[in-house]
Image (cartoon, rainbow, N blue to C red):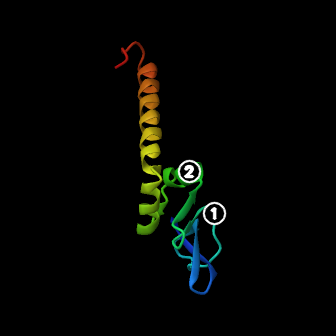
Amino acid sequence: MVKLRLKRCGRKQRAVYRIVAIDARSRREGRDLRKVGFYDPIKNQTYSNVPAILYFLEKGAQPTGTVHDISKKAEVFAELRLNQTKLNFNQCNEIQKTKGGISRI
């Protein structure tokens, strides 16, 4: 299982975190699959690669609590819902086309 979680970087007492996609069995500083953002709690700065986060969430990655809160502030989940709505609408249209002659909703 893939998780989106924080990976600690920086020096003593000046922690900076990278938001990474990583295997759930790996340790905190283990090898990550992809870096998808960073979070600086001291300066309260965040950077998120939204397309990369959406990709992993659509594939079933589970964000940790802190990453979930950071993503919520960046409105990633709103974009995820929009993408899923578009996807469901397109799938519905394709199903109706294959059944032949059923009117669109």
Relative depth, front residue between 61 and 80: 80
Return the x and y of residue 89 as percentages of the image width and height. 42, 30
Taking the view exactly as shown, the residue that stands out farthest to the front is 43
Return the x and y of residue 25 as percentages of the image width and height. 53, 76
Relative depth, front residue between 93 and 30: 30
Q: Is residue 70 above or below residue 79?
A: below
Q: Determine whether, in the image, residue 24 is placed left or right of residue 77.
A: right
Q: In this view, does 55 lie above or below 41?
A: above
Residue type highlighted by circle 1: Lys
- Does residue 74 appear in the picture of this structure? yes
- Does residue 2 appear in the picture of this structure? no
Residue that badge 2 annotates: 50
Instruction: Tell me the element at label 2.
Output: helix
Q: Earlier in the sequence, mark 2 or mark 1?
A: 1
Q: How crowded is mark 2: few (under 14 residues within 10 Å), some or many (20 or more)?
A: some
Which residue sits at x=58%, y=58%? Answer: 47
Quadrant for the C terminus in the image: top left
Residue type highlighted by circle 2: Val
Query: Which of the numbered marks, if any, corresponds to residue 35?
Result: 1
Q: Residues within 10 Å of mark 1 (few under 14, many from 20)?
A: some
Which residue sits at x=50%, y=50%? Answer: 58
Instruction: Tell me the element at label 1.
Output: strand
Which residue sits at x=57%, y=79%? Answer: 15
